Image (tube, rainbow, N blue to C red):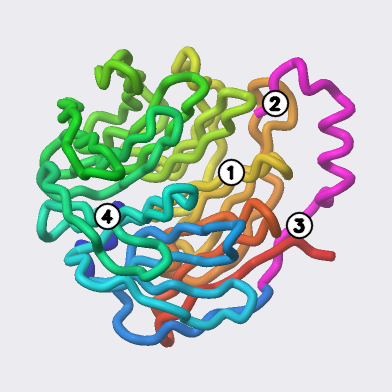
Amino acid sequence: MKTVRRFTAFKQSLGLLALVQGAAAFGAEDPYHFIKEIPVGGSAQWDYLTIDAEARRLYLSHANKVEVIDLASGSIVGVIENTPGIHGIALAPKLGRAFTSNGQENKASIVDLKTLKTVAKVTTGANPDCILYESTPNEVYTFNGRGKSATVFDPDSGKVIATIDLGGKPEFAVSDGAAGRAYVNLEDKSEVVAIDLKTHQVVSHWPIAPGKAASGMAIDREHHRLFLGCDNQLMAMLDSSSGKVLATVPIGAGVDANGFDPVTQLAFSSNGEEGTVTIARETAPGKLTVVQTLKTVVGARTMAVDPLTHDIYLPAPTPSFRVLVYGQKK
């Protein structure tokens, strides 16, 4: 992501009823508050974190390894070693596999989820950053920052299937198997690129103006929305079918991650320089509204959303490295 390892929404079909139910269920004002923190310790060097909701585990990139945290107890229950310059973790629980993007060695690791041991490494483009697994074609994508490319490989054999020239520096990516597309921010171009999952070809370049230099991205697959965290302090909402920018709202400085909860229909932006999370909702077709500016900690810039509990998790660097947990008011 943007500063890490440099290391140191509803369519017309939802209707008014859904909007009213959403507001009643999750509160009209300030639905989120601090719950607890999970101590991690060690150096404050991290990037992405990923949740396995069914297994109740959190995978946190940390220096040159992955900390595996049990969400029920808040304790570290395992470590994935030998991931130099790790940025991201993608999970394929049905395959029993995890995948990491190791930016310092230009490789991705294939990891056994039971043993947490690396079973193979795949050579990628330069500085693999974001990584995702898409089950529909059963493929893994790394998005390579300095390589300005995406590497596609088989999750079982590790065989490279394709290398995609993106035409710019990728930051974060999401995929939609049903639509047959992957979407990635090109930070230096202020664009979103759409990739055909079958042909491994770039099919669209979408400008994100008035947004600039987006880093984070989240997706609402049901309603075909992309939520982008832009460097000029905007959250932009795009139609993932057409690429049209539908709405923007102001956010804090230093965004590095976005999230979306399909149950609450809330979109999140973690703003590390300001120490806030902006929480928004599409309150009418094409209208994005901020429902809360949640105070967190300066430096808490990446984030994961738990789709079961709806809690959000943010690593924080000071006074000691830890993960902050925020949830809905009861």
Q: Amino acid under label 3?
A: Pro
Residue 301 pos. (x, y %): 42, 61
The amino acid pointed to by label 2 is: Phe
Label of residue 10 in the image: 2
Gap in angstroms between the C-alphas marked 3 and 4: 38 Å
The residue under label 4 is 110
Relative to residue 140, is residue 240 depicted above or below? above
Identify the element where label 2 is drawn.
loop
Q: Nearer the viewer, mark 4 or mark 2?
A: 4
Between tags 1 and 4, which lies in front?
4
Task: Point out the tag, 1 or 2, that comes first from the N-terminus.
Answer: 2
- Residue, disc 1: 260
Q: Quadrant of residue 289?
A: top right
- Counting residues from the start of the chain, the first of labels 1 and 3 encountered is 3
**Amino acid, disc 4:** Ile
Q: Is residue 151 above or below residue 308?
A: above
Q: What stretch of residues is rendered in magenta?
A: 8-34
Q: Secondary structure at mark 1?
A: strand
Residue 32 falls within the magenta-colored stretch: yes
- Dot 1: within a 10 Å radius of its alpha carbon, few (fewer than 14), some, or many (20 or more) residues? many
Dot 4: element:
strand
**Up-down: is 235 above or below 273?**
above
- How far apart are labels 3 and 2 at the CA level? 19 Å
Q: In the rendering, at what x and y percent does residue 223 appear?
A: 63, 24
Viewer-side residue, 265 vs 245? 265
